[in-house]
Image (tube, helix red, strand yellow):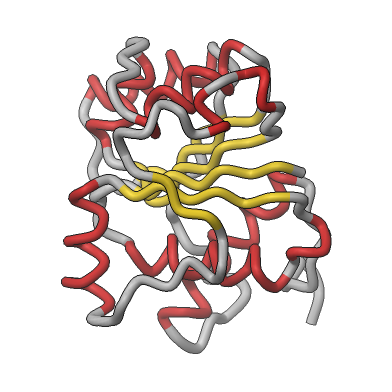
Amino acid sequence: MKLAIGITGASGAIYAQLLMKACAEYKNQLDNVAIVFSPNAKDVWHHELKISINTYGFTQYEYTDFNAPFASGSAGYDALVICPCSMGTMGKIAHGIADNLITRSADVMLKERKKLILAIRETPYNLIHIKNMELITLAGGIICPASPNMYSNPATIEDACNTVISRILDLLGIAQSTYRWGSK
């Protein structure tokens, strides 16, 4: 699977960090992973995580690089996960505004009928957010709110956030060892 990961300036940089870490752990199931950060994503990362950005050896592309392979359907990328996904990015995608590499790549995934997963980070939602989620869902995208589960009894914030990452990996079809409902 060829996977692109877009990281926006929504709060929740830990989700992006854990997703890249999981992709590195399951790299035997991935042919290629490409990363793109929005400018605000880098600021949020440093503010929330207080560590340098580690892309786990995956190729990182610039936010304005429309020559990145996943900006074209002919490159054959299978999926794009935007994690975390800001409401502004979601709104642009819902209305076909492809003015940066993340939104252009989302447009490509939708037009090619490939997997687009938005791990949205906002609460509460207003009607505009809900309508944008509806538009993306009708277009074939998947809205996967960054809402951790509690039934797995997570012991740390990282454990709780990993419940969201596990859902994303499931949506991508990546086999993993994780808590499953009903297991002990």
Is residue 122 visible in the rendered image? The answer is no
Q: Quadrant of the C terminus?
A: bottom right
| Picture residue at 44% right of the left edge, 56% below the top | 147
Answer left or right for 31 relative to 91: right
* Above-or-below relation of 118 to 154: above
Is residue 71 visible in the rendered image? The answer is yes
Q: Quadrant of the N terminus?
A: top right
* Residue 66 place in picture, x, y as percent: 40, 26
* Residue 175 place in picture, x, y as percent: 83, 59
| Picture residue at 46% right of the left edge, 79% below the top | 158
* Residue 55 place in picture, x, y as percent: 48, 66
Q: Nearer the viewer, residue 2 or 45?
A: 2
| Residue lying farthest to the bottom in this orientation | 155
Answer left or right for 15 relative to 59: left
Q: Quadrant of residue 113?
A: top right
* Above-or-below relation of 20 to 141: below
Answer left or right for 78 relative to 147: right
* Residue 152 place in picture, x, y as percent: 62, 75
| Picture residue at 56% right of the left edge, 60% below the top | 58
| Picture residue at 65% right of the left edge, 30% below the top | 115
| Number of marks present in the image shown | 0
Q: Nearer the viewer, residue 95 or 62?
A: 62
Q: Quadrant of residue 133?
A: top left
